[in-house]
Image (cartoon, grey):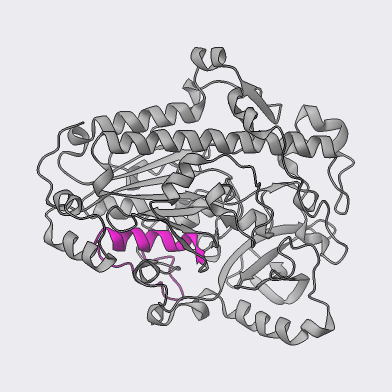
């Protein structure tokens, strides 16, 4: 075990098995040192873990092998109804790392670095750094585009981000997936193995690196992002897997909601088949099974790496005073609605895994089915660390460095009876190809419904959305149709429900804030 200087907070936590959140905050106030934070992000990970399986998510794989994520959930709070703000890497990461939504960040694709549109915004690691933390990151935390400075080294990190792509195993980029033998791994490790190794090294050297400061360490795992390359031993868990549902998109769903599985369409092993995929036809069964098996094998691979990281956190003595947050940046279609990929407003593309472990507080498994959003993570971690509270953003906040368009999850950690929001929001733009105009799919999830209005969207206009120009409407009753199989927006008996949901959607996130979060 690595030796540490006397840490009053750590000693206080070790003296008792469990404390309340209020007691936790009191202990931080009494201590001369704040808790550390380990922030883990997985790429394109739907909430595929055994601990997440429940009747509201029948689309999850029942045979998923995730013992380490399940173990982490058993010592934390598992938020089963968590949602990203957009089902694409860069828009989602720019959102949760600044706690702003897309109409503020104006990051809608993977080519825009958020500081090009919002240069003054303070990020999650930057906020910890500016409040006395040693901040470091490795792997894919920000979306690592080719834009100069996209790692955000100048602002967010105490030391430069560690990028390891050039040192990793080079897979065949023209193929969607492949299993890697032990011999190949030994010759050149996979990227996420290198990320894990750097994270372990950082923990080993943290006393010297941080020079007495608490640390905020972000670890970004690239899988299960395409291309799906993984150690071949994980295939053994998926000799039999479930089929997706629905296999294709129902005629009641507007075509604007569909996407063309572009992430696999250029892979050479599927080139002959992809041309036959269409908005209302299913992908071939053999391809569907093959891709699902590869994705699930990647999930088990990532699960193993998370387990190793958590074990090393304990072995180095940091486990007892380190908050752990594990999230995925967005979900992923695995044949549902005939789609492979993200970039939609369907449930499978926007429901994400979130586990929050607070040592001494969340020592027993706890499950929350309250609706939460990834913009909630930033203010929550700041509160748990005892940092200055992140205020709710004003209507126009692009020039406000620190604020949140989410809500701190602290009330949910204190009592299940706390007032909480009943609606969460996300969005995604699709193009109307016949008119070469973009439509934004503004979506709202309630405990029962998912409601989406597709409206014409002008990126350069001050008010981007034209709510009078509709490209389509979607409504699904998850109490009866958790697969979102049939759109009921045009059903006459749903007219009053649709009217109410439309009013709530247009009022936006601010109208859904918990009572104590309103200004």
- Is 392 magenta? The answer is yes
Looking at the image, is 395 positioned above or below residue 114? below
Q: Is residue 52 left or right of residue 385?
A: right
Q: Is residue 148 visible?
A: no
Looking at the image, is 381 positioned above or below residue 274? below
Residue 94: give x, y in percent of width and height: 49, 53
Please tell me which residue lies in front, 113 or 366: 366
Please tell me which residue lies in front, 452 or 305: 305
Q: Which residues are magenta?
A: 372-401
Image quadrant in which the N terminus is located? top left
Please tell me which residue lies in front, 220 or 476: 476
Residue 223: give x, y in percent of width and height: 55, 37
Which quadrant of the figure has residue 229? top right
Looking at the image, is 234 positioned above or below residue 153? above
Residue under the image location 32 percent in, 55 percent down: 358
Q: Is residue 308 left or right of residue 456?
A: left
Residue 91: give x, y in percent of width and height: 55, 53
Which quadrant of the figure has residue 183? top right
């Amino acid at each position: 075990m690595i030796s540490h200087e006397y840490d009053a907070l750590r000693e206080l936590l070790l003296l008792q098995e469990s404390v309340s959140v209020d007691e936790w905050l009191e202990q931080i106030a009494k201590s001369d040192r704040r808790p550390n934070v380990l922030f883990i992000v997985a790429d394109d990970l739907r909430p595929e873990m055994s601990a997440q399986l429940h009747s509201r998510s029948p689309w999850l794989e029942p045979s998923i092998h995730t013992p380490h994520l399940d173990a982490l959930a058993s010592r934390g709070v598992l938020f089963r109804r968590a949602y990203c703000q957009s089902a694409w890497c860069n828009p989602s990461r720019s959102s949760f790392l600044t706690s702003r939504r897309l109409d503020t960040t104006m990051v809608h694709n993977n080519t825009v670095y958020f500081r090009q549109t919002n240069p003054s915004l303070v990020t999650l690691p930057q906020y910890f750094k500016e409040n006395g933390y040693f901040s470091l990151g490795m792997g894919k935390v920000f979306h690592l585009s080719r834009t100069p400075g996209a790692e955000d080294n100048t602002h967010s990190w105490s030391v430069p981000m560690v990028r390891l792509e050039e040192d990793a195993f080079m897979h065949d980029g023209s193929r969607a997936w492949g299993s890697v033998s032990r011999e190949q791994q030994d010759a050149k490790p996979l990227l996420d193995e290198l990320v894990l190794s750097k994270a372990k090294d950082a923990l080993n050297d943290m006393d010297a690196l941080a020079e007495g400061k608490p640390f905020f360490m972000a670890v970004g795992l690239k899988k299960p992002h395409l291309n799906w390359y993984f150690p071949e031993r994980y295939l053994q868990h998926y000799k039999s897997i479930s089929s997706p549902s629905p296999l294709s998109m129902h005629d009641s769903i507007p075509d604007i909601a569909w996407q063309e599985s572009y992430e696999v369409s250029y892979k050479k092993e599927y080139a002959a088949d992809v041309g036959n995929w269409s908005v209302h036809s299913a992908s071939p069964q053999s391809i569907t099974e093959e891709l699902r098996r590869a994705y699930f094998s990647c999930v088990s691979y990532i699960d193993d790496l998370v387990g190793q990281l958590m074990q090393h956190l304990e072995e180095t003595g940091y486990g007892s005073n380190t908050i752990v947050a594990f999230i995925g940046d967005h979900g992923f279609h695995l044949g549902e609605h005939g789609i492979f990929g993200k970039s939609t407003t369907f449930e499978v593309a926007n429901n994400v895994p979130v586990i929050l472990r607070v040592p001494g507080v969340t020592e027993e498994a706890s499950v929350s089915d309250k609706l939460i959003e990834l913009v909630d993570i930033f203010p929550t971690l700041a509160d748990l660390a005892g940092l200055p509270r992140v205020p709710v953003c004003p209507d126009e906040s692009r020039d406000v460095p620190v604020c949140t368009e989410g809500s701190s999850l602290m009330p949910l950690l204190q009592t299940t009876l706390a007032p909480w929001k009943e609606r969460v929001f996300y969005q995604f733009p699709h193009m109307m190809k016949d008119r070469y105009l973009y439509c934004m799919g503004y979506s709202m999830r309630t405990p029962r419904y998912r409601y989406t209005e597709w409206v014409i969207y002008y990126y350069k206009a001050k008010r981007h959305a034209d709510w009078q120009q509709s490209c389509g409407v979607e409504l699904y009753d998850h109490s009866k149709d958790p697969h979102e199989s049939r759109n009921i927006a045009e059903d006459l008996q749903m007219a009053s429900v649709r009217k109410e949901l439309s009013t709530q959607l247009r009022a936006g996130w601010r109208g859904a804030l918990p009572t104590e979060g309103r200004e």
